[in-house]
Image (cartoon, grey):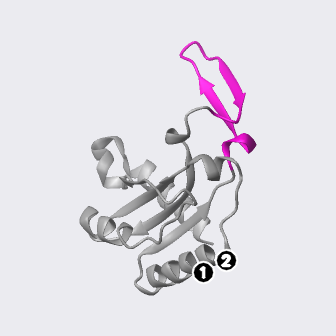
Amino acid sequence: MRFMILLKADKHSEAGEMPDEALLTAMGKFNDELIQAGVMVGGEGLHPSSRGARVHFSKDGGVRVTDGPFAETKELLAGFWIWQVKSKQEAIDWVKRVPMPMLSGEAEIEIRQIFEMDDFGEAMTPELREQEERQRAALAG
């Protein structure tokens, strides 16, 4: 099972404040543990929303772009991981070990399972499955 682990932003990350050496060291050590355990597939920190954009699609075919920053910090992300684990509980257990990631001393991390091909049932035709497998192979290298 794959899960995306979403680190919610706070006022410090949205202000572009960078982590100190102690936090970078702690996160590096934690990421090493994830990699050695075969859990971590990927992960990155994200720039503040002031450097981002949102693209809104409407049912009439319109597309609207809004540049950041965005008002609600609690709805924004500061970083993410993608983990391969056996269960949601295993993901929870790993998240409980994350070093305090935010300068404010408070953090919220959301855990979301990633869809696999089999989750789509009959809609995932053999042709679509083959296409998905080709795409994954191309991404892998």
Q: Quadrant of the N terminus?
A: bottom left
Image point (37%, 46%), residue name: 125
The answer to which image quadrant residue 139 occupies is: bottom right
Residue range in magenta is 48-70
Instruction: Name the residue nearer the viewer: 70 or 19.
Output: 19
Please, what is the three-letter code of the amino acid marked with disc 2? Glu
Tell whether position 60 is magenta. Answer: yes
Q: Are marks 2 and 1 in contact (CB under 8 Å)?
A: yes
Please tell me whether mark 2 sits on a helix, a strand or a loop: helix
Determine the residue positioned at 54% across, 68% down: 42
The spot of residue 21 in percent (x, y) is 67, 77
Q: Position of residue 104 (x, y in %)?
A: 54, 56
Q: Quick check: 109 above or below 33?
A: above
Rendered image: mark on residue 17:
none
Q: Amino acid at mark 1?
A: Thr
Describe residue 93's horizontal placement relative to residue 46 as left or right: left
Residue at the image point whose x is 56% and y is 40% from the top: 73
Q: Nearer the viewer, residue 20 or 48?
A: 20
- Image position of 66 with respect to 32: above or below: above
Looking at the figure, which quarter contains the C terminus? bottom right
* Label 1 environment density (alpha carbons within 10 Å; few <14, some 14–19, many ≥20): few
According to the picture, the residue beneath numbered tag 2 turns out to be: 21
User: What is the CA distance from the residue labelled 2 to the residue labelled 1?
Assistant: 6 Å
Q: Secondary structure at mark 1?
A: helix
Which residue is identified by label 1?
25
- Residue 106: x and y, percent? 46, 56
Instruction: From this view, report whether residue 60 is shown above or below residue 24.
Output: above
